[in-house]
Amino acid sequence: MPAGTLWLLPNCLGGDNVSDVIPETVLARIRQLRFFLVEEPKSARAFLKLTAHPGPMQQLRIERLTNATPPEELALMISRMQGGEDAGILSEAGCPALADPGATLIRLAHDANLRVAPLTGPSSVTLALMASGLETQRFSFHGYLPIKEPERSRAIRKFEERSRIERETQIFIETPYRNRALLAAMLQACGASTLICLARDLTLTTEAISTLPVESWRKIPVDLEGKPCVFLMLAERKIAGNQNA
């Protein structure tokens, strides 16, 4: 029997507009799978219902996959695929393994010579970078910054200097309830001409994406409360005709 495939399944970034952000060919693949590796089984089942998965849900094999999943459980997942069963890694939002669990299992799948197949879907990091107007040839994604001060501000200043020297966009994410604290730290730590892009509620009807220099962000109120947000930064970019940059 041929070995199974490890499918990397995209999820929505929020809301229930599945057909608007995930291609039908990907949804068709999701509906065919019976073995899912997920962060939270309850929310995974809710997403599968939105995809019109034929189920029944109680007959699907849905196992938890986190950064703390023991090696012996990962080995069992690999064994099932070696035995011919396809599996799908499903993130809570966006594409799996990007600042989310999954990379360790994917590496084990490669070690076992299993096919790993990423499927097209929304990535908040990619969408934010596309729409930012910042440097897209050179960029770095750092995931989550330190929560506490002064470590957080120290990291921000370090990445701002890296951006300045390398002309490289720096990208961060944060849990929605800490968005305001991160933005406040960035506005305090960064130079006035450093450009910051805030990409909020991507793919939702409330989507808002704005790029302004720090000195402009300091003058306007920004509502980030409870909103998924990607933060992008580029230090001292010069744009002809824009005196603020």
Image (cartoon, grey):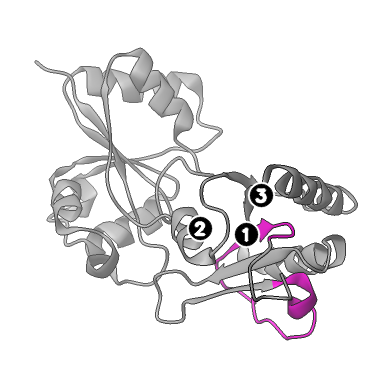
Q: Quadrant of residue 84?
A: top left
Task: Give the mark nearest the N terminus, 1 or 2.
Answer: 2
Q: Residue at x 69, y 42 (%)?
A: 166
Q: Residues within 10 Å of mark 2 (few under 14, many from 20)?
A: many
Q: Looking at the image, which is closer to me, 60 or 154?
A: 154
Q: Disc 1 designates what residue?
A: 232
Image location of residue 98, percent across then percent down: 48, 43
**Left or right for 200, reference 185:** left
> What is the secondary structure assignment of the residue under circle 1?
strand
* Spatial separation of the CA atoms under disc 3 and disc 1: 12 Å
* Spatial separation of the CA atoms under disc 2 and disc 3: 16 Å
| Residue type, numbered disc 2 | Leu
Quadrant the N terminus occupies: top left
| Residue type, numbered disc 1 | Leu
Task: Give the mark nearest the N terminus, 3 or 1.
Answer: 3
Task: Give the mark nearest the N terminus, 2 or 3.
Answer: 2
Image location of residue 172, percent across then percent down: 63, 53
Looking at the image, do the residues carrying marks 1 and 2 touch, with CB atoms under 8 Å apart? yes
| Residue type, numbered disc 3 | Tyr
Q: Looking at the image, which is closer to me, 74 or 24?
A: 24
Q: Disc 2 designates what residue?
A: 129
Foreground disc of the pair 3, 1? 1
Q: Which mark is residue 144?
A: 3
**Left or right for 195, reference 86:** right
* Spatial separation of the CA atoms under disc 1 and disc 2: 8 Å
Q: Which residues are magenta?
A: 213-237
Foreground disc of the pair 2, 3? 2
